Amino acid sequence: MPNDRPRDPSGQASPTAAESAPLDITRLPSPLPLFLRALLSFRKPAHAQPLPPLAFARRNVTLDAGEIARYARLCGFTAAHGVPPTWPHLLAFPLHMLLMTDRAFPFAMLGMVHLDNRILQHAALAPGDRLDIDVRCGPLFAHDKGQVFTVLTTARRGGVVIWTGESGYLRTGVPDPLGAPYRAALSAAPSLAKTFAWQVPADLGRQYARVSGDYNPIHLWPITARWFGFPRPIIHGMWSFARSLAAVLPTGVPTLDLRVEFKRPLPLPGDVTLWCDPRGGAFELRDAAGAVPHLRGRWQRAPTDSTTSTASTTSTTSPASLDPDRS
C-alpha cells in the first residue's frame, strides 16, 4: 500500500503537491484496513505544518450504470438527472482515504471535521464513461478551532478535465494554524421557503456505506457512534448534500457549479426539511422545525468555458456554527 513505501533517504526537498506526479493505484485496498489506519493516526501530534506532496490516481475508471443507479435511488436522483454530479466524489473517496491515512500526512483523522465541498462539472457525464481521477493535497487555511486543509480532486475524460472537486476539512485542536483566514462562502438567505420534508431512517448510514464505501463508525450503529462521542449515528454529510441536490437540480443541465457547507450533524433516525429560494439556487437542509441548519448549499450553471481548476479559496462554515459532521 502507498502508506508502506519507504521514505526518501536523500533528504532532498520534495516537489510541491501541485508539481508532484501522482502514484497510480491499480488495486484499491478494502475499507477496513484504511479505517484501522485512521484509528491509529491518533498518535500524530496536533501541530501545524505544511502538507506533503502526496498525490494518488486511478486510471480508466468506468462509470458503472448499475452502481450509479443504486446510488441515485438512495439519494433521490431520477433517471432524467443522468449521472449525479456528486458521483465522481465517491469514485475518488478511496484515494482521499489513502492520502489522509498515509504516514506522511501530518494530521490525525480522529476528530476530523468535514466542513465543505465545491464541485465544478464542465460537461455531462454518462454511464460507460472512463475517467482518470487524480487526488492531491490543496491549500491550508487558519481557523480559530484548528487547522483547515483541503483535498483536491480532478477527473479527466479523454485527457480533458470534466469534473473538479475541493473538499475542506478541519483538524481541531491545532494551535497556530497555517494559511489565510478561513471564511464562509455562503451566507444565510432570508427568502428561503420550506419545500420538502423527509424522514431519515435509522439504517440509512449503513445503506449509504454499502454504496459509497464510507464505513466510518459514526454513521453505522448506536454503539459505534457512542465510541466517538455521538449518542446516535449521524448520516454522511455527502448523502445530505446529494439528497438536497436531487430535490433542487433541474434536469438537462450539463455544467454545474455546486457548493455546500456542513453545519450540524443529522442524527439517525430523524426528520428534516428542505428550504429553497424560489428565485435562485440557494437551499438549506434543516431540522423538522426548520430552526437548525444541517447544511447550507448553492447550485448554479457553470459557464461552458469555465476554468478547469477548483477555486483557490475553500468555502467554510463560520466558527460559531460548528458542531459538525466528522469524516
Image: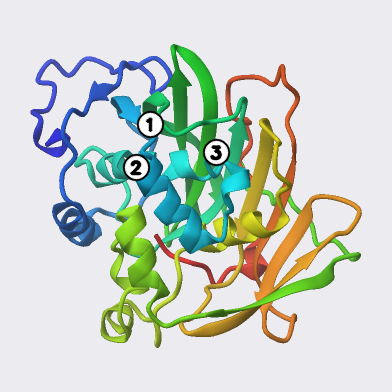
Going by the numbered disc 1, the residue's amino acid type is Val
Foreground residue among 2 and 266: 266
**SS at circle 3:** loop
Tell me, what colour scheme is on the image? rainbow
The quadrant the C terminus occupies is: bottom left
Disc 3 residue crowd, few under 14, some 14–19, many 20+, Cα 10 Å: some
The residue carrying mark 1 is: 135
- Give the residue at the far top of this rendering: 159
Q: Measured from the top left, where is residue 194 in percent x and y?
A: 80, 74
The residue carrying mark 2 is: 96
**SS at circle 2:** helix
Q: Measured from the top left, where is residue 134 in percent x and y?
A: 38, 26
Sequence-wise, the earlier of marks 3 and 2 is 2
Query: Can the viewer see residue 183 in this picture?
Result: yes
Q: Which mark is residue 179?
A: 3
Query: Can the viewer see residue 140 in this picture?
Result: no
